[in-house]
Amino acid sequence: MLFRQCAAKKRSLSYVLGDPVTRQGVIIDPTADLVAQALSFLAERKMTVQYILLTHSPDPALEDTLNKLRPLGPRVVAHESTEYQGVDVRLRDNDALHFGEETIRVLHTPGQMPCAVTYWWADRLFTGETLLATGPGACGPGGNIAQQWRSIREKLLNFPDEYLIFPGRESRKRRVACVAEFRLAFSDKSGVSAPAVHEISAQTKTDHAGQLDKTNNRSSRKMVGA
């Protein structure tokens, strides 16, 4: 399997997975400033884009990007509850998506948005804005912080310690984390409870546009990577 994490100056992150046998690939959460990187990575390896995987409902800028990608033939994938009308494949919790000889599973992780999902491939979890490398991401339209926390605690933290978290956005200069870090940070011994995480998520709400990633020093020291 070929893998690439694409990063932009605005701190957004996209991912490319490619099967070298069948020459089929997928892009997770492409953005206008990252899609060129992703397509170049695939083109250099003579691969085609089979699916575009969305972890949440797209904003207008992402919709424009998806429209530009359609002539290339990929099918857009998202959770069945998304209101975005440009979806070709609507999936439910624990559905499997196959491309080439590879399989990606879908985990419905609502909270950041009602339709938020995490994609699970091998030992990697692509969490979008649900869980960044240093803590929960800011809620989007229709989001619910308490539900987001439940998704993190009851689904994502149930994976083995060594599983890697690949988020949809860089946070405090971090682009990857592992389950063990969050399990430790969110344990009772660490002093970080669900309300503390809720408070931090609310404080970083303006970070959703990639302009601000600050919390108060006392709270942020308790989070992963602080």
Image (tube, rainbow, N blue to C red):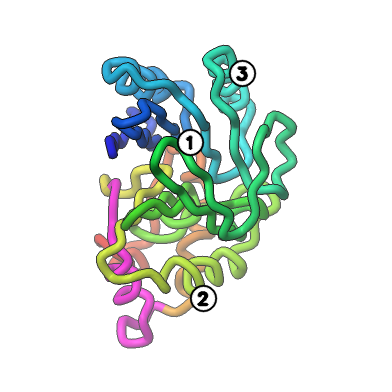
**Residue matched to label 3:** 67
**Quarter of the image holding residue 192?**
bottom left
Residue 186 left/right relative to 226: right
Q: Which residue type does callout 3 highlight?
A: Asn
Residue sitting at x 30%, y 36%: 5
Residue 69 x %, y %: 54, 18
Residue 7, label in figure: none
Confirm whether residue 159 shows in the render: yes
Marks 2 and 3 sit apart, C-alpha to C-alpha, by 40 Å
Residue 29, label in figure: 1
Residue 195, label in figure: 2
Residue sitting at x 54%, y 67%: 151
- N-terminal label among 2 and 1: 1
The magenta stretch spans which residues?
175-192
Marks 2 and 1 sit apart, C-alpha to C-alpha, by 29 Å
Residue sitting at x 44%, y 38%: 210
Local packing at callout 3 (Cα closer than 10 Å; few below 14, some 14-19, many 20+) is: few
**Quarter of the image holding residue 180?**
bottom left
Secondary structure under badge 3? helix
Residue 110 x %, y %: 61, 59
Using the image, determine if residue 68 lies above or below residue 29: above
Marks 3 and 1 sit apart, C-alpha to C-alpha, by 14 Å
Residue 42 left/right relative to 120: left
Secondary structure under badge 2? helix
- N-terminal label among 2 and 3: 3
Number of disc labels: 3
